[in-house]
């Protein structure tokens, strides 16, 4: 079965995953989400022009929307460091294992759902946990 998502849906589900699971992912697997300072400053400025109520995850998504990248750094083995762009989010969220993707779509998601979406976007598979 293939799921088709709009770019907006893919971004929304990835954003929700960042909000609900980024801390879980980073604390449990020896990996860390990073970005360049320049990309962060550019994204934050872009958001400030649109809203005053932006959270950290809003800035992370805006980094991608303004052409930047997010990097998941593997501090344990160094073998699983990956970089993504907005195109990866658009392409890979729909590849999330169906039960987790439908949980997100149906707003029945939790930290596990978020973890699986984040791993799928960065690694194209669930490799941790």
Image: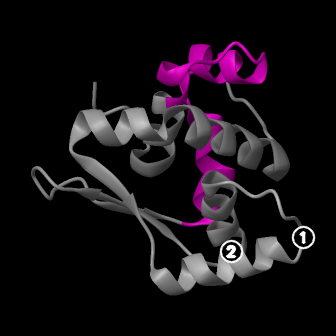
Local secondary structure at mark 2: helix
Residue linked to disc 1? 50
Residue at 57% x, 32% y: name it. Answer: 20
Query: What is the crowding at mark 2: few (fewer than 14 residues within 10 Å), some, or many (at least 20)?
Result: many
Residue where numbered disc 2 is placed? 44
Q: Nearer the viewer, residue 71 or 89?
A: 71
As drawn, 85 above or below 89: below
Do we see residue 125 in this rendering?
no
Q: Is residue 99 left or right of residue 47?
A: left
Magenta span dominant secondary structure = helix
| Quarter occupied by the N terminus | top right
Q: What is the span of residues highlighted in magenta in the rendered image? A: 85-114
Between the C-alphas of marks 1 and 2, the distance is 10 Å
Q: Give how far across and how far down residue 67 sits, in percent.
A: 65, 79
Q: Left or right: where does residue 116 sit relative to residue 48?
A: left
Reply yes or no: does residue 8 show up in magenta.
no
Residue at the (29%, 37%) spot, across then down: 27
**Quick check: can you spot residue 32?**
yes
34, above or below 46, in the image: above
Q: Quadrant of residue 54?
A: bottom right
Left or right: 33 in relation to 70: left
Q: Residue at x 79, y 39 (%)?
A: 5
> Which of the pair 55/107 is nearer the observer?
55
Q: State which tag comes first along the sequence, 1 or 2.
A: 2
């Amino acid at each position: 079965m293939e799921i088709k998502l709009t770019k907006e849906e893919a971004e929304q589900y990835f954003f929700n995953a960042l909000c609900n699971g980024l801390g879980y992912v980073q604390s449990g697997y020896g990996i860390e989400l990073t970005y360049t300072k320049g990309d962060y400053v550019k994204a934050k400025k872009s958001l400030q022009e649109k809203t005053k109520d932006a959270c950290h995850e809003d800035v992370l998504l805006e980094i991608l929307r303004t052409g930047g990248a997010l990097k998941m750094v593997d501090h344990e083995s160094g073998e699983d460091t990956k970089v993504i762009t907005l195109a990866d989010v658009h392409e890979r969220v729909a590849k999330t294992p169906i039960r987790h993707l439908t949980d997100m779509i149906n707003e029945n998601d939790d930290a596990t759902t978020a973890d699986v979406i984040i791993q799928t976007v960065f690694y194209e598979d669930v490799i941790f946990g």
